[in-house]
Each structure stands twice: as structure tokens, then as C-alpha cells.
Amino acid sequence: MERELVVTGVGGQGIQLLAKTLALAATRSGRYAMLTADYGGEMRGGPSRAGVVIGDEPLRSLPVLAAAWSAIVVHHRFSGPALARLRPGGPAVVNVPLVDPGSLPAMTVHPVDATAVAKSVDAPQAIGFVLLGAYNAVTGVVDPAALVEAMTELLPPYRRQHAPANARALAAGAAVPVVPVGATVGVPS
């Protein structure tokens, strides 16, 4: 089975590092992964998108995704083209309040206030990792420890001091109760 992920946000939010972390964690876990990156020339504030395809066998899908099963939406700006490619029903982890959960009505939307969660674990720069932790908790795509190992490996030497905070953000995101929009909590069905 192949699973596709679209990550969209603005430059400076860690979109590319988040996607690379997931792809590396998947390959280190014995799965197949491909990654594509699409970002503006600006360092911060411009469009930033990534696509990741993960599978248990050699991949048939290209990472330039015409359609995708899931999404992580870090910021609403520039997200339209990426979101238009989502297949209905898949999981979408969205950063509220920057992203309106109602903007993805055909998806199973899991809202996360990533800014508040990141601040609560003293990792205010790691909102992308909060969302990745939540996404992984929802999908179970890789072992959480593999994400921490991949993230640590991918950090350049001049950013290694952020690894502990990023690891806390991944764990905090995984611990957030990501209840789909419209679901009732605590009521037996």
C-alpha cells in the first residue's frame, strides 16, 4: 500500500525539514519513500510545499502528486493548489487557528493548535514537528523513535542544539488528542 502526503505552509515554518524527516524515518524503517520539494526563492514567507510517498514495496507513485491521501497544513496562505489535489476522506492535520478546519470539508480533519503545544514544551520554533508528531499518531506511518532519529540526523551542525526541543515537539504532537472535526468525544457509540 502506498500513502501520499502533501505538506503545505510558508517558508520558515520547517515544511521541508518536516517532510525530509518523515521520508528518512520511513526508509530507515525498511519502507520505501520518495520526496519532492517546492518552495519560493524567499527564505521566509513565500510558498513552501512538499510531497512524500511511502510504501511497503517499490513505489509506483511519483512524489509529484496529482492526488494525495493525506495532508499537513501549517498555514493557509498558498495552500489552495496543494489542497485541491487531496482525495476525499483521508486524514488532514491542520494548524489552528491559522488554518480553518472547514476549508477541508471532504477530509477527516484533525485540528491541532501547534503554536500553543510547541510553546507548552518550550519549543516555540518547532510547530512543524508538533504537527508531524500528531500526523504520525493519526496515521501510524512510522515508529515515533524513527522520527526523532531522522530529525536529529538531518539537522545541520549549526542547528543541532535544537534537536532536544524538536524531539519534545514531536512527542507533544503525538500526545495531543487529535479528534476529527465533528466527532463527539467521550460519548460511546
Image (cartoon, rainbow, N blue to C red):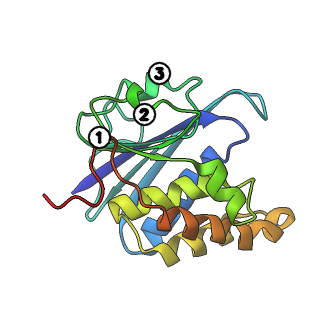
Q: How far is mark 2 from mark 3, CA to CA?
A: 14 Å
Q: Are marks 3 and 1 in contact (CB under 8 Å)?
A: no
In the image, residue 10 sits, relative to residue 185, either above or below, namely above
- The residue located at (41%, 28%) in the rendering is 83
Q: How far from the left and from the top, in percent, is residue 173?
A: 53, 61
Tell me the quarter of the image containing the C terminus: bottom left
Q: Which amino acid type corresponds to the residue marked 2 in the rendered image?
A: Pro
Q: How far from the left and from the top, in percent, is residue 40?
A: 68, 27
Give the residue at mark 1: 182
Q: Nearer the viewer, mark 3 or mark 1?
A: 1
- The residue located at (29%, 40%) in the rendering is 182
Mark 2 and mark 1 lie on one chain; the one further toward the N terminus is 2
Q: Which amino acid type corresponds to the residue marked 1 in the rendered image?
A: Gly
Q: Which amino acid type corresponds to the residue marked 3 in the rendered image?
A: Gly
Q: In terms of image quadrants, where is residue 38? A: top right
Give the residue at mark 3: 80
Provide the secondary structure element on which disc 2 rests. helix
Q: Are marks 2 and 3 in contact (CB under 8 Å)?
A: no
Packing grade of label 2 (10 A; few <14, some 14-19, many >=20) is many
Q: Nearer the viewer, residue 161 or 33?
A: 161
Per the rendering, the mark at residue 101 is: 2
Provide the secondary structure element on which disc 1 rests. loop
